[in-house]
Image (cartoon, grey):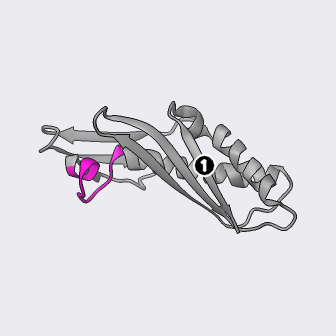
Amino acid sequence: MKRTANAHWNGTLQEGKGEISTQSTTLNNTQYSFKTRFADGVGTNPEELIAAAHAGCFTMAVGAALSQAGFTPGDLTTDAILDLDMQALSITGIHLELKGSVIDGVPEEKFKEIAEGAKANCIISKALSVPITLNVSYQ
């Protein structure tokens, strides 16, 4: 299986602009620029796309792991906070904030154990070489 995306850029770093598209066309010539990446411009940026991909992958992995353990997952919501070091121009880590609705028969410690396993084993976590932290709210 292959997944594809395309980016086009024209111009200098600060004055240029570009568009990003995905195979699914969910992003279809979506604009990005210096302002969308490092200020408050309208559009997207590579770092928020990594955070979105990680949040989506991890949340699906939690649901899959709960199902594999014989439980029926309820509502799962994850915020992914990506830390970007502007001096070094590098991603220094991603923090995942998982909120899960209580599932009958699943104590909080078991839920947290499953979430930690999903954090370590989701496809995007495995693709990243930065520290990944997790906080779980189970209520």
**SS assignment at label 1:** strand
Q: What's the residue at 71%, 69% (across, down)?
A: 139
Of 64 and 1, nearer the camera is 64
Is 44 magenta? The answer is yes
Q: Is residue 106 above or below residue 12?
A: below
Query: Crowdedness of circle 1 by 10 Å Cα count: few (<14), some, many (20+)?
Result: some
Under mark 1, the amino acid is: Leu
Q: Is residue 101 above or below residue 58?
A: below
Query: Viewed as shown, does residue 131 lie left or right of 139?
Result: left
Q: Quadrant of residue 73?
A: bottom right
Q: Is residue 137 visible?
A: yes
Q: Quadrant of residue 87?
A: top left
Q: Quadrant of residue 26?
A: bottom left
Query: Viewed as shown, does residue 16 lie left or right of 90?
Result: left
Q: What's the residue at 47%, 40% (across, down)?
A: 93
Q: Is residue 23 visible?
A: no
Query: Viewed as shown, does residue 76 lie left or right of 6?
Result: right
Query: Viewed as shown, does residue 90 lie left or right of 2?
Result: left
Count the labels in the image. 1
Residue 132 image offset from top left, x and y in percent: 55, 40
Is 101 magenta? The answer is no
Q: What's the residue at 40%, 50% (across, down)?
A: 48
Residue 18 image offset from top left, x and y in percent: 23, 45
Q: What's the residue at 23%, 57% (across, down)?
A: 41
Quadrant including the N terminus: top right
Location of mark 1 (residue): 134
Q: Which residues are magenta?
A: 35-46
Residue 103 image offset from top left, x and y in percent: 79, 66
Of 2 and 82, nearer the camera is 82
Of 114 and 3, nearer the camera is 114
